[in-house]
Amino acid sequence: MIVKRAGEVAGEEVPAGVGTSRQVLIGPEEGPHFAMRRFRMEPGGGMPNHTNTVEHEQYVLAGRATIGIGNEVVEVQKDDVVYIPANVPHWYRAEGDEPFEFLCMVPNLPDETRLIDED
């Protein structure tokens, strides 16, 4: 069993993002099957279009965002749930005046993130 306070887990800036940070709340060394991460995007921040080789299960904790998933664009807010299949392009843009925060669970499998060049 592992219990810890999220506020005591170190965060890190996400290099590809703008105004985006991540905490690994439960990592592969703690959970055998899934990792739990908390993302925070400052107002106007976000992540560029990219793919991952693992699926994402997400729960929105606070704020609002526009998310592109494949060919769809959706608006999400607190208490929404999002599923992003593996290898599907996706991007995020925080909306409004407060940070956009969400939990993201991913399987503990090899993951490669690829940015999609949209020239």
Image (cartoon, rainbow, N blue to C red):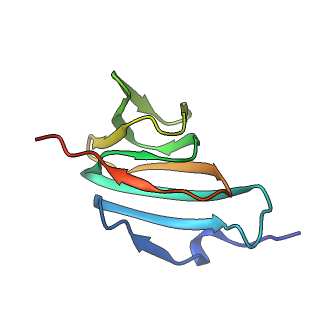
Q: Residue 110: x and y, percent?
A: 60, 59
In this view, which residue lies farthest toward the right? 1
Can residue 99 be seen at all in this image of the molecule? no
**Nearer to the camera, 14 or 44:** 14
Give me the residue at 68% from left, 71% from top. Answer: 5
Classify 87 as above or below 113: above
Q: In which quarter of the image is the C terminus?
A: top left
Classify 33 as above or below 76: below
* Quarter location, residue 57: top right
Answer with left or right where residue 26 lies relative to residue 18.
right
* Quarter location, residue 65: top left
Answer with left or right where residue 103 lies relative to residue 1.
left
Q: Residue 59: x and y, percent?
A: 58, 40
Q: Residue 1: x and y, percent?
A: 89, 69
Can residue 62 be seen at all in this image of the molecule? yes
Instruction: Give the number of marks.
Output: 0
Give me the residue at 63% from left, 49% from top. Answer: 105
In this view, which residue lies farthest toward the top? 72
Answer with left or right where residue 98 lies relative to residue 112.
left
Give me the residue at 28% from left, 61% from top. Answer: 19
Q: Residue 68: x and y, percent?
A: 34, 31
Classify 93 as above or below 40: above
**Nearer to the camera, 88 or 94:** 88
Give me the residue at 57% from left, 46% from top. Answer: 54
* Quarter location, residue 76: top left
